[in-house]
Image: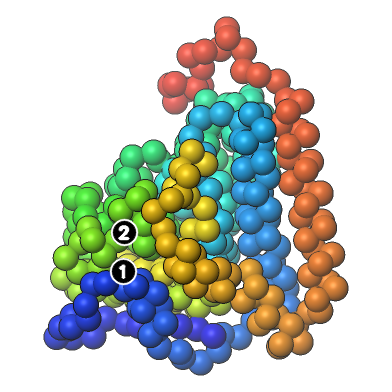
Amino acid sequence: MSQVRQTPPNHTNSKGLGAEEHAERFTNLIHSEPTNLDRDSGLELFRDMTLGRRFEDKCAEMYYRGKMFGFVHLYNGQEAVSSGVIGAMRKKHDWFCSTYRDHVHALSAGVPAREVMSELFGKETGCSKGRGGSMHLFSKEHHLLGGYAFIGEGIPVALGSAFTSRYKREVLNETNSDSVTAAFFGDGTCNNGQFFECLNMAQLWKLPIIFVVENNKWAIGMAHDRATSDPEIWRKAEAFGMKGEEVNGMNVLSVRAATQRALNRARAGEGPTLLECLTYRYRGHSLADPDELRAKEEKEFWAQKDPLKQLEKDLISNSITSESELRTIEKEIDKEVIDSVDFAINAAEPSSEELTKYIWAEDV
């Protein structure tokens, strides 16, 4: 089902800001007409989401076994956002800008699992040549503009990408320049000045960009409703005259449908969209986080909204596929993930003689 609310005029926020505000908003989302889904698209979404989930599970295993080092922030529970947004866009044409929780964004953008896993192991075969690690994945080939460790850091980069697209079309007369940029960031970023400044500039210049808020309620250990005067981030678009939508971030079809609407507006020259995807991360902030702050009842509520289980239900109930076919796909994904680990472990370390390589543009 496609679930969304769009910006109404003269909004008055009358709801209380309790501990269950996030779940309440999610539950009260308006249900609109079902999204049409063909077999190929449905199975591709399932593959992509399954790859994201199994890849992150394997990262956790490698980290706790002492095979992977540094900070590692996993994406479990939020797969519908990555697959729904990036899956609706055009690979190697549109552009994507991520955060420190970037593994799954990279996979959805088409970066091979071997390259992503190699980067997490700091190997030369990684997509950032072993120099970036978990939080700084980058792939020029796949139009991934990078993962960024500081919150809000990637939003101006995404804005520049969107500006480039419009500049090429309107100033350089490149008629095929209609790429759209997706900027991913979390709810904790949305009180940051870069967020507001970039929303203003994007709307002022009608830039082809989608601001994707992955609102998982928790900014490290701070609950979102305790940190902002109005927790409904999508409504902040209204201040700039921008289209804003609140989306079920646990349903890939809802995210996909909202993204398609935003893409149509952007490619038609109608400017940016702010999508607030209500989602939830199933693990702590990072693998070093004991995750003791969140209530058991809260975790149980969101576990019942698992985006993979929801998609599986939709695919089977609409006779698009069978349970046995989905189990076969999972086995194929498991082999791919295991292969990526084997490849990364056996890959070469960056040479100490090339310590300063890739610092300057001419090295790329």
Q: Is residue 99 left or right of residue 139?
A: left
Q: Nearer the viewer, residue 73 or 322?
A: 73
Tell me the quadrant of the picture where the N terminus can be found: bottom right
Residue in the picture at 67% in, 41% down: 61
Residue in the picture at 76% in, 87% down: 319
Q: Residues within 10 Å of mark 1 (few under 14, many from 20)?
A: some
Q: Nearer the viewer, residue 362 or 66?
A: 66
Rendering coords of residue 235 (x, y %):
24, 73
Earlier in the chain: of badge 1 and badge 2, it is: 1
Q: Relative to residue 275, is residue 172 depicted above or below?
A: above
Outermost residue, bottom side = 33
User: Which disc number belongs to residue 223?
Assistant: 2
Residue in the picture at 46% in, 91% down: 32
Q: Nearer the viewer, residue 234 or 62?
A: 62
Q: Secondary structure at mark 1?
A: loop
In the rendered image, is residue 131 in sight?
A: yes
Q: Relative to residue 50, is residue 36 depicted above or below?
A: below
Q: Secondary structure at mark 2?
A: strand
| Mark 1 or 2, closer to the camera | 1
Callout 2, which amino acid?
Ala
Query: Which of the 4 image quadrants contains residue 261?
Result: bottom left
In the rendered image, is residue 232 in sight?
A: no
Callout 1, which amino acid?
Ala
Q: Residues within 10 Å of mark 2 (few under 14, many from 20)?
A: some
Q: Is residue 82 left or right of residue 160?
A: right
Task: Name the residue that disc number 1 marks.
Answer: 19
Query: Real-space Cα distance between discs 1 and 2?
Result: 8 Å
